[in-house]
Image: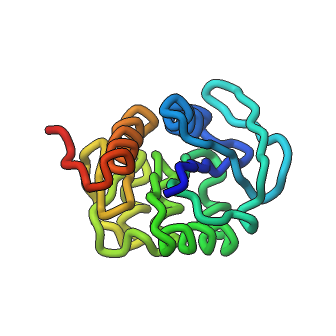
Amino acid sequence: MIREAVGIAFDGVASRDLSMPIDRFAANRWSTVYVGRGEGAVHGFDPLRRFEVARTLSTLMRPAVVVVPGGFDWRSLAGNEAVLEALRRSATSGAYVIGVSTGALVVAAAGLLGDRHATGHWLALDDLAALGAVVDHDPLVRSGKVFTASGALAALDAVDTIVAEVLWGREVAPVE
């Protein structure tokens, strides 16, 4: 398996939701890249940060992991068929998907959480349920190869689980 983790970057992205999981993959010697609707700089918040988008979603091949962060523009992503199709295509090809905070809503809009347990930002749990997910209040929820996290810190546990599974070649039980 190619060890590539991609993070979807967009203006108004919650910087930590994107950078913390991607940096953790990089620290484990994975190839990482920011992808988006277009190439170039996008600006996040909390803290203010700039991300360089190296590839567009339309050129997304077969990454091992796709990180979908939260942010102010999640509704635009959830309504963008190119974004949703890229997520579906990645999941169908066997990629892990991590929806962080309101990024879980984008994952749900792509149809990857229908009738599955999921979590996300606490203020958006009703929206998550409306998109067909079964809301869970745990900070990290796993459904097959799809993880949803309430925030960036919880997403780090998903990263560690994925890295271990790829390294050992089998599913790893979560630590209780």
Residue 78 quadrant: bottom right
| Above/below status of 13 relative to 97 | above
Name the residue: 69% across, 72% down. Answer: 82
| Above/below status of 162 relative to 131 | above
Query: Could you say which is closer to the camera, residue 30 or residue 159?
Result: 30
**Left-right relation of 13 to 23:** right
Residue 135 seen in the figure:
yes
**Left-right relation of 176 to 92:** left
Q: How many marks?
A: 0
> Residue 148: x and y, percent?
38, 52
| Image color mode | rainbow
Q: Which residue sits furthest right?
A: 40
Query: Could you say which is closer to the camera, residue 131 or residue 169?
Result: 169
Q: Quadrant of the C terminus?
A: top left
Name the residue: 69% across, 42% down. Answer: 12
**Left-right relation of 93 to 162:** right
Name the residue: 76% across, 32% down. Answer: 50
> Residue 81: x and y, percent?
66, 75
Q: Which residue sits furthest left?
A: 176
Residue 84 quadrant: bottom right
> Residue 170: x and y, percent?
27, 55
Residue 153 quadrant: top left
> Residue 156: x and y, percent?
40, 36
Name the residue: 50% across, 51% down. Answer: 102
Residue 150 seen in the figure:
no
| Above/below status of 162 relative to 154 | below
